[in-house]
Image (cartoon, grey):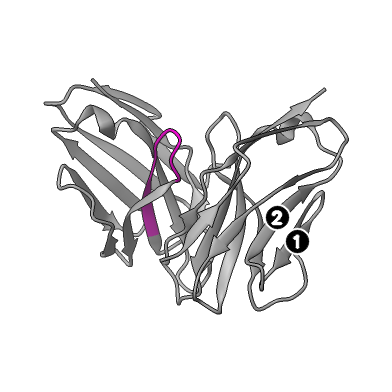
Amino acid sequence: ETGVTQTPRHLVMGMTNKKSLKCEQHLGHNAMYWYKQSAKKPLELMFVYSLEERVENNSVPSRFSPECPNSSHLFLHLHTLQPEDSALYLCASSQSGTDTQYFGPGTRLTVL
Amino acid sequence: AQTVTQSQPEMSVQEAETVTLSCTYDTSESNYYLFWYKQPPSRQMILVIRQEAYKQQNATENRFSVNFQKAAKSFSLKISDSQLGDTAMYFCAFMKHNSGNTPLVFGKGTRLSVIA
């Protein structure tokens, strides 16, 4: 399944670092999502972009900053993260007007 | 707000046997979608099956079928002829009916192990 790709697959960073997660979809979709998957918790929605505009921000701290330069790419910029931000970050895409979301393989983030 | 509950954190099944994973949800919406996603150790979240709430017929995809009970707000997944490759985390998810870009609400998941 290579419709949605994410890089890097693994990332270790210190609390003072700045890094970015990248998501790319090759499915011609026009909506993209960031979800956070922490241990023993359900997947939580972070952001939704539709036609490159942010349509939902699920009360995410400002140390997470999304960017959607075009309908195929979605970034999550990270700065001054906390150890509790360690999680699997999943990107997904869908076509507006349809219901099925397709997921990438995720980035496993560890904050030291 | 919608919630999704998966009451079985872990389950196991013998290869070739049948297993049923439970899911209940809470919503005041009348039109919505329900999904089962599979997440193997590779972490890729893969759609297994989807159900539209306005359809009474239960969805089926090869060895996977659902028992959708709208009044009871129940959406269980049955896996027949279980295979070793079915070993994974299984997530039940809910989505309100919308014109698009509506987020999924997930349960906590059930870890299924298929034993040879």
Residues at badges 2 and 1 in contact (C-beta under 8 Å)? yes
Q: Position of residue A49 (x, y in %)?
A: 32, 61
Residue A27 visible to the viewer: no
Disc 1 chain ID: B
Q: From where the camera sits, is residue A102 visible?
A: yes
As for residue A41 lying within the magenta part, the answer is yes
Q: Nearer the viewer, residue B42 or B20?
A: B20
Span colored in magenta? A32-42
The residue wearing badge 2 is: B76
Q: Which mark is residue B67?
A: 1
Q: Residue at x 72, y 52 (%)?
A: B77
The image shows residue B111 at horizontal and vertical percentages of 62, 35
- Which quadrant is the C terminus of chain B positioned in? top right
Same chain for mark 2 and mark 1? The answer is yes
Q: Nearer the viewer, residue A26 or A87?
A: A87
Along the viewing direction, whichever of B6 and A54 lies nearer the viewer = B6
Q: Write the residue at 49% across / 47% down.
A: A103
Can you say whether B37 is above or below A50 in the image?
above
Residue A11 on image: x %, y %? 32, 25
Q: Is residue B17 above or below residue A27?
A: above
On-image quarter of the N terminus of chain B: bottom left
